[in-house]
Amino acid sequence: MKLDILAFGAHPDDVELSCGGTLIVHAQKGYKTGVVDLTRGEMGTRGTSDQRMEEAADAGRIMQLSVRENLYMEDSWFVNDAEHQKAVVRMIRKYQPEIVLANAPYDRHPDHGKGARLVEDAFFKAGLKMLETFDEAGRPQEPWRPKKLYHYIQSVSIQPDFLVDISAGMAKKMEAIRAYKTQFFNPSASGPDTYISSPAFIKMIESRAQEFGHRIQVDYAEGFVQSQFLGVSDLFHLV
């Protein structure tokens, strides 16, 4: 299956929190979207990795993803080496996305910046003809380099390079986040308090989307940064 947009997240829920609305509004427009989680989030304080996988599947259905996969890398311990880069390359070549979304370049959780660099390196190498990779059936994969790589913004406030109007998908974004019942504020859930389990964290996610939206005169938006120049052929393509 060829995708239009493929988002990578170091952990299940990274994508929902940071670019879930963008994926939702593009799915609503008929684009094919997908998510690849690098790890199962097994080092998380609340819940289990099996629960996270179930929650991720539920969130994926809410976001109308065409595909969702997990690379089963080791949470907190994965590294940016040839083995891990090739695993990401296989996903890029498998789904041949036009656009790739990746973790924030730097953030509170070290896995986020590490995941960003891993995907950025694999993004380039996926287009190298001399790099051999094979699909699940052992067949050689063709090189593929997507058109663009963008980084979504996570806990640390980063000045965005551009903003995406997610007003039509904000309600679904919050529904997808709430699918992670063991992770975020849930009066009926048990477990110790964490940085992301407080009501204030969810309020921050909503407030940031509202503040980003205010900047472009819409209700809600998500922000992205990029390391390449942005170009348009028509000034009216800009909001």
Image: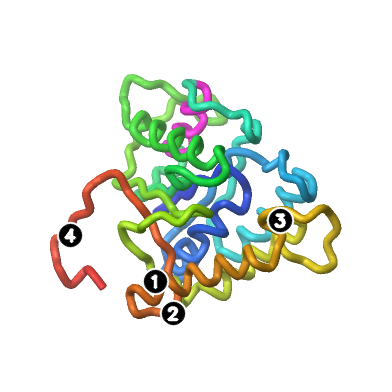
Q: Which residue is mark 4?
A: 232
Residue 219: numbered disc: 2
Q: CA distance from mark 3 to mark 1?
A: 26 Å
Q: CA distance from mark 2 to mark 1?
A: 8 Å
Labels 2 and 1: the sequence-earlier one: 1
Q: Which residue is mark 1?
A: 165
Labels 4 and 1: the sequence-earlier one: 1
* Kind of residue at badge 1: Asp
Return the x and y of residue 212 as percentages of the image width and height. 41, 69
x 75%, y 61%: residue: 181
Q: Residues within 10 Å of mark 1 (few under 14, many from 20)?
A: many
* Kind of residue at badge 4: Val
Q: Residues within 10 Å of mark 3 (few under 14, many from 20)?
A: many
SS assignment at label 2: loop
Quick check: 81 above or below 48? above
x 45%, y 49%: residue: 6
Return the x and y of residue 114 as percentages of the image width and height. 50, 35
